[in-house]
Image (cartoon, rainbow, N blue to C red):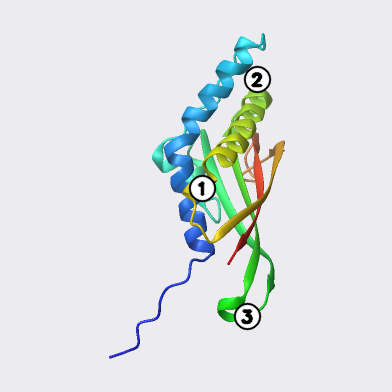
Amino acid sequence: AGVLVARKYDIENLADDIKTLLAANLNTYTAAVEAEQVAAGMPAAPPPTIDADGYFLFAWNDQALNKAAGVGIFPQEAASQGQGSFGVRKLIVDVGMYISGTQNDPLAARKLLRTGKAMAQLFEDKWGKINSCVTREKIETVGPIDFKFNVDSSDDCKIAGVTLSVTLG
């Protein structure tokens, strides 16, 4: 029989935990930000709600191409210090909501700005729900940015969200 080694929390665990946190809270946070902006006199621009199957880890896929909106979670290694159980890993995690078909939506940028604000607030409020060996160092909002999922498509998309700087270990 082989030796059972304790599994160390890693980048894949972090992505799954972020997905779980977002799936449980993002729609509520975006609705709260929308209500706050409308109460402040801004035009109504409710971000789309994201279904449970609207979260994508590590890369966009064909399923994402068929959705009007979704959230991508993209962790990547930034640096490592030390070795073995004494090491720490610095990661950058980009988390963004995309909306497709934005070429005729004058409120798309507002929807995404509100989503970025909701994500930043969510990670501020709920980061303790992520594994205790992960330290969140910085949250930056990003976007909205124009892009195309497919170069052969005329469907314009926009994306916005947050970039998290974290340390594992």
The amino acid at mark 1 is Gly
Q: Residue 77, percent across and down?
A: 65, 65
Q: Residues within 10 Å of mark 2 (few under 14, many from 20)?
A: some
Q: From the viewer's perspective, is residue 65 above or below residue 57?
A: above
Q: Nearer the viewer, mark 1 or mark 3?
A: 1
Q: What percent of the width, then of the height, locates residue 88? A: 63, 70
Q: Residue at x 58, y 67 (%)?
A: 169
In the rendered structure, which disc, 1 or 3, sits on the residue that comes first in sequence?
Answer: 3
Q: Which mark is residue 128?
A: 1
Q: CA distance from mark 2 to mark 3?
A: 48 Å
Identify the residue under disc 2.
Answer: 107
Q: Determine whether the residue tagged by mark 1 lies in a helix, strand or loop.
A: helix
Q: Give the amino acid at mark 3.
A: Gln
Horizontal arrangement in the rendering, residue 24 relative to residue 74 (left or right) = left
The residue drawn where x is 67% and y is 29% is: 113
Q: Residues within 10 Å of mark 1 (few under 14, many from 20)?
A: few
- The quadrant in which residue 122 appears is top right
- Residue 83: numbered disc: 3
Mark toward the viewer: 2 or 3 = 3
Identify which residue is drawn at 55% across, 56% down: 58
**Amino acid at circle 2:** Leu
Which one is nearer the viewer's eye here, 75 or 87? 87
